[in-house]
Amino acid sequence: MTPLPRKVAVIGAGDIGCGWAALCAAAGWPVMIFDASARGLERAATDVPRRARALVALGRATQGIVERGLLELQQGRSLLHAVQDADWVMEAINEDLVAKQRLFHAIEDVAGPEALVTSSSSGIPPTELFARCRRQDRCLVAHPLNPPELIPLVELVPGAQTTAAMVARAHDYLRALGRMPIVLKKPVPGYVVGRIAAAVWRECIDLVLTGVIAVDDLDRAVSLGPALGWAAAGPHLTYHLAAGDGGVTAFLQQLLASFEEWWGQLATWQRLEPEQERALTHGVERAYKGKVEELREARDRRLSAILRALEQARTT
């Protein structure tokens, strides 16, 4: 079993970076967060403790461990200060390829020779992310979903030169944090989660913009409809179970023609026109205006309840 990291360095204090830091702090791990922006570090000083303590309130962490972890949470004075002696360096800056490449090049100059280096990128292929690194053998993508301290799935996307040992080490670290890593057999733009989300969201946007349904009703249709089934079983297993003893073979015999007809009518546009983007923004903001913090807290409570139910179901 891989030893736990003696120190984790999180580079980037946005939503993802603060979520990673909160998760590590909630596990009692020594973690140092660094951001080139003073405003980012100021935000982290309040956001990371808030998110770590929220895990306690949601029953996802233990108070004593969180408090110990928060004592271990430090802010890096520089990239060197943050990264030196870290066993795991997590990049979590904005999805900007050039900025990420520059950062990884800089990390390589100051990270220890045995450090694991991961990117939180949501869709850039590893060969592009780590193109300027000499030591690509220790680099891979560990893409979390938002909020990373709650949603357990993490996509591991190795590069062409990533060693199996480093993939295994990332897998073990994530499992120790209570995450559920999946390893992609080959990289594709957007990885797996992003491509599925993009395909579903395009159809959701199209249904709203063509006047079929309102934004809030669409969100309910997904979250209380297929998303519930997918949370319990995933799409393939959902359909495999839907036809009883006949399984997916019977399901395809009965419904493939209908699905093929619907596939032929799904949205295929490649980009939103400016007026469509404005209409979408207006619809979402009108549906949820003035409720963002309240809705975020409600979402987190629901996520925690769903995870608790799924965990209990696995143990019974």
Image (cartoon, rainbow, N blue to C red):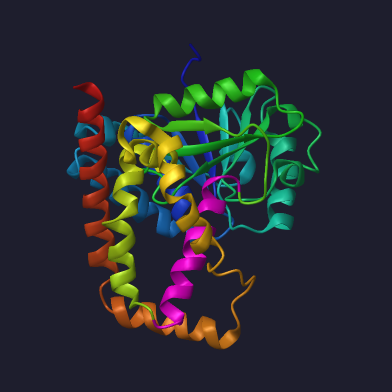
Image coordinates of residue 237 in percent, x first then y, are 39, 36
Foreground of the two, 148 or 20: 148
For the view shown, which residue lies furthest in the bottom direction?
275
Question: What is the count of numbered marks?
Answer: 0
**Nearer the observer, 259 or 210:** 259
Q: Quadrant of residue 79?
A: top right
Q: Is residue 39 visible?
A: no
Which of the 4 quarters of the picture holds residue 152? top left
Residue, x 59% and y 56% (percent of image)?
36
Q: Residue furthest top?
A: 1
Most frequent secondary structure within the magenta stretch: helix
Left or right of 30? Residue 290 is left
Quadrant for residue 140, please give it.
top right
Query: x, y percentage for residue 198?
Result: 53, 59
Q: In this view, does 111 lie above or below 55?
A: above
Any magenta on residue 144?
no
Residue 17: give x, y in percent of width and height: 48, 48
* Nearer the observer, 73 or 17: 17
Q: Which quadrant: the C terminus? A: top left
Extreme-front residue of the structure: 253
Q: In this view, does 293 lie to the left or right of 190?
A: left
Confirm whether the magenta stretch covers residue 210. yes
Foreground of the two, 224 or 312: 224
Q: What stretch is highlighted in magenta?
A: 191-211
The residue that appears at 28% across and 64% down in the rendered structure is 220
Q: Position of residue 166 (x, y in %)?
A: 63, 23
Q: Residue at x 59, y 77 (%)?
A: 272
Image vertical order of residue 307 relative to residue 221, above or below: above
Q: Mark yes or no: residue 172 visible.
A: yes
Identify the residue at image location x=32%, y=83%: 286
